[in-house]
Amino acid sequence: MLNFDLYTPARIVFGRGTQQKIGELLKPHAKKVLLHYGGGSIKKSGLYDQVVASLKEAGIAFVELGGVKPNPRLSLAREGIALCKQEGVDLILAVGGGSTIDSAKAIAMGVYHEGDVWEIYDQGLAIGKALPVAIILTIPAAGSESSGDTVISNEETQRKYGYGSPHLRPLISIMNPELFFTLPDNQIANGVADMMSHVFERYFTNTTHVDLTDALCEATLNTIIANAPRLLENPQDYDAWAEIGFAGTVAHNGLVGMGREQDWACHDMEHELSAIYDVAHGAGLAVLTPAWMTYVYKDNIDMFAQFAVRVMGVTKGLRDKEELVKEGIDRLRRFYRRMGLPQTLSELGIDGSNLETMAKRATRVAYGPEKPLGGLKKLKWQDVLNIYRLCK
């Protein structure tokens, strides 16, 4: 087990009706907030009115900025930064899913940065502080409600980068499973693929003597696999949503990755898909993950055999590890298909014209010195290209 520093200050307020407490919860921390959200769904559902009423009752002033899209845009974050400076905002309240939260975090750190916020993502600049961020979660997927991570898309350059800092951990996150009831099947499926990938990126490691976090990863994955199909049958299953929502938080708050070398190659590869083609992040991960597994499993076959047995429930062929692993990967594909997720790039509307470009951009060789991806197996641009080709 490697050295680690676990810091998870985000307060999670869970349960029915908790969104109506937002004003009370924020009152000790803010006098004026930026209410940040996506499209019109929170207004159609009545959530917007509930939030506004709670803020007014607590005497908290607010300005608002809607319009967040999937794969959140840098241009809107810049608009939010200017608005916060102009209005003297002291907290950002993000009402939405991962894209809205990521956009809020970009705004939060951009307010104190003297240059353009894109410099922080592009150059990996350290930040000393950020505006506090609070969240009302409407789509469980990204785990951004408790993580210090953010991802933004620069629509001008078609580049999508992530960034992480302890200063971006949310102050308070509200999770009411009732707010997930109206999500369409494709958003349910994409969210499930995203949270599973957050576990995979930590689970598949060469680090040994990590029995506890192995078990935590496996329990989280098994919980997701058991409960996600129930939501396709009944999207108003409160108990299933409670399990999925909390699993999404645990998958990305840092706990299951402690003491382990992590990977993140699939996320880096997927960022190129969504940067150029604007595909749903979870859908892209569902296509890439089994292909990545197929390409790298021989570099640590014992880890993948453990996954096949403990997560995918393979019980036959224990004497032949290769067959065991292949069956585990195939069962993952079948689970994704059961959830209605794509399995090829062509299903995402992606042809082969940009594969080499994406591989070189993912490894940064397109911009300068190459930075191989991953931890379990270091992937150079030719490796990334081979994985993309496996997805066709």
Image (tube, helix red, strand yellow):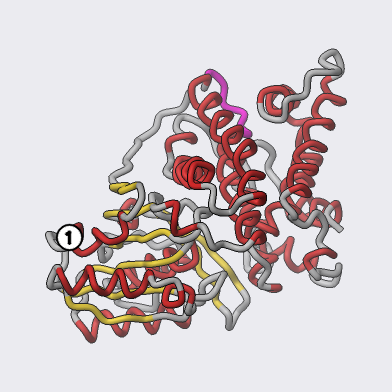
Segment tinted magenta in the rendering = 204-209
* Quarter holding residue 333: top right
Q: Residue 245 at what x, y percent from top left?
A: 48, 47
**Residue displayed at 54% across by 43% down:** 240
Q: Residue 10 at what x, y percent from top left?
A: 30, 48
**Residue displayed at 38% across by 67% down:** 95
Q: Residue 156 at what x, y percent from top left?
A: 58, 83
Front in this rendered view, residue 89 or 179: 179
Relative placement, left or right, of 318 versus 183 is: right
Magenta part mainly helix, strand or loop?
loop
Residue 32 in view, yes or no: yes
Q: Amino acid at mark 1?
A: Glu
Residue 74 in view, yes or no: no
Relative placement, left or right, of 355 versus 32 is: right
Residue 217 on the magenta span: no
**Residue displayed at 38% across by 69% down:** 47
Total tally of numbered discs in the picture = 1
Relative placement, left or right, of 181 versus 88 is: right
Residue at image mark 1 = 24
Is residue 377 positioned above or below 235 on the image? Answer: above
Front in this rendered view, residue 232 or 269: 232
* Quarter holding residue 360: bottom right
Q: Residue 165 at what x, y percent from top left?
A: 37, 54
Is residue 196 positioned above or below 386 on the image? Answer: above
Q: Quadrant of the C terminus?
A: bottom right
Q: Residue furthest top?
A: 319
**Residue displayed at 63% across by 68% down:** 367
Relative placement, left or right, of 46 versus 265 is: left
